[in-house]
């Protein structure tokens, strides 16, 4: 087992979200984490302004990176060590956090340069609003792509709590100018349901797909050849991912999620990714570890196809 030094505060409690000394995903050795040579770039975005119910998403990037230092870097499914393709972790983005619109612009400006270099950018949220900045930055470099959102919630409100840039409005903003596919849905309000009927949107509800496989090819077929992938961690069932802002029962399991992501990586070119809405707590180490593992599995699938 890989081991790291303990981090303890004055009370002797080990905090989950204290950055390790180097702050690199997986504690990858320097020759495999050099920026110039790395195919994958990890961008921590601890933005949290519009979240409701459980707060704490701003701590997620640190918790994920800290947990990742205890991962084995060999993938037994693929007989492969994904980190050797190069995974560089940038410092946290903190610009523009005083308003959603400023954050979106600052994030777009940052990732545009990364995408222009041909990097696969994986943003660690933070709340789901960061997807808007990631997509805006990608659109400056790529014009023809669709968006896949894995989420328990539709996020199709036109506005929420006084802003159109709430985490609850992300899909509504995206659908105005992009083709999107939503998978894993199991929570929405009446206005969102009416909007879905009005626009004749086709969503993949969790009740129709959990425990089945035939939906996977259909969902993938609705996407263009190039895609952006957004993963709200409440997409997963709370039995394996309880530490999220708004957990919903009835989500997808670990292995069916991996099967879908593996198939997706074989059929489509994924240009960018965000993983959002983890709300780490000192008593829930498994959620942070599962998030880190999911990201590493995605990197494995994307770099072996």
Image (tube, rainbow, N blue to C red):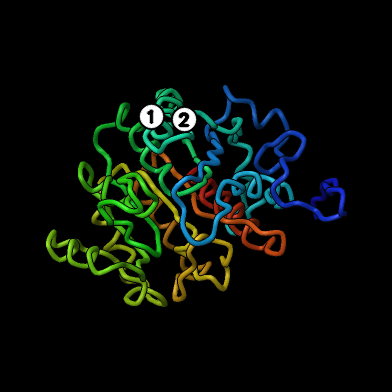
In the rendered image, residue 165, in percent from the top left (x then y), is placed at 34, 44
**Against 247, is 17 above or below?**
above
Q: Residues within 10 Å of mark 2 (few under 14, many from 20)?
A: some
* Secondary structure under the numbered disc 1 in the rendered image: helix
Question: Residue 208 versus residue 160: which sits nearer the camera?
Answer: 160
**Against 233, is 177 above or below?**
above
**Against 170, is 107 above or below?**
above
Give the residue drawn at x 46%, y 53%. 51
Q: CA distance from mark 1 to mark 2?
A: 8 Å
Q: Which mark, by number, is residue 194?
A: none
Q: Residues within 10 Å of mark 1 (few under 14, many from 20)?
A: some
Q: Which mark, by number, is residue 105?
A: 1
Q: Say which quarter of the image contains residue 5.
A: top right
**Does the residue at mark 1 contact the one at mark 2 (Cβ under 8 Å)?**
yes
Give the residue drawn at x 66%, y 63%. 286
Q: Say which quarter of the image contains residue 34.
A: top right
Which residue does the numbered mark 2 point to in the structure image? Answer: 96
* Secondary structure under the numbered disc 2 in the rendered image: loop
**Against 85, is 285 above or below?**
below
Relative to 131, 83 lies left or right = right
Give the residue drawn at x 55%, y 41%. 46
Tell me which label, 1 or 2, sits earlier in the chain. 2
In the rendered image, residue 174, in percent from the top left (x then y), is placed at 27, 45
Q: Say which quarter of the image contains residue 211.
A: bottom left
For the residues carrying marks 1 and 2, which lies nearer the camera in this image? 2
């Amino acid at each position: 087992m890989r081991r790291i030094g303990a981090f303890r505060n004055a009370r002797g409690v080990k905090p989950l979200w204290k950055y390790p000394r180097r702050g690199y995903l997986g504690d990858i050795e320097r020759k495999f984490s050099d920026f110039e040579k790395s195919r994958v770039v990890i961008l921590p975005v601890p933005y949290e302004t519009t979240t409701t119910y459980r707060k704490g998403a701003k701590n997620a990037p640190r918790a994920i990176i800290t947990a990742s230092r205890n991962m084995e870097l060999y993938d037994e499914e693929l007989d492969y060590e994904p980190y050797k393709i190069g995974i560089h972790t940038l410092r946290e983005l903190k610009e523009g956090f005083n308003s959603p619109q400023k954050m979106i612009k600052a994030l777009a400006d940052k990732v545009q340069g990364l995408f222009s270099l041909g990097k696969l950018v994986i943003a660690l949220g933070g709340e789901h609003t960061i997807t808007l900045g990631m997509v805006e930055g990608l659109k400056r470099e790529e014009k023809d792509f669709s968006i896949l959102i894995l989420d328990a919630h539709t996020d199709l409100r036109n506005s929420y709590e006084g802003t159109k840039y709430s985490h609850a409005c992300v899909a509504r903003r995206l659908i105005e100018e992009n083709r999107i596919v939503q998978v894993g849905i199991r929570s929405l309000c009446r206005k969102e349901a009416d909007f879905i009927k009005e626009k004749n949107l086709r969503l993949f509800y969790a009740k129709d797909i959990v425990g089945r496989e035939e939906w996977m090819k259909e969902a993938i077929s609705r996407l263009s050849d190039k895609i952006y992938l957004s993963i709200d961690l409440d997409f997963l069932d709370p039995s394996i991912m309880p530490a999220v802002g708004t957990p919903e029962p009835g989500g997808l399991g670990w292995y069916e999620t991996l099967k879908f992501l593996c198939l997706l990586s074989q059929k489509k070119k994924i240009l960018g990714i965000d993983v959002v809405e983890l709300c780490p707590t000192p008593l829930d180490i498994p959620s942070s570890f599962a998030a880190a593992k999911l990201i590493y599995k995605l990197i494995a699938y994307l770099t072996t196809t």
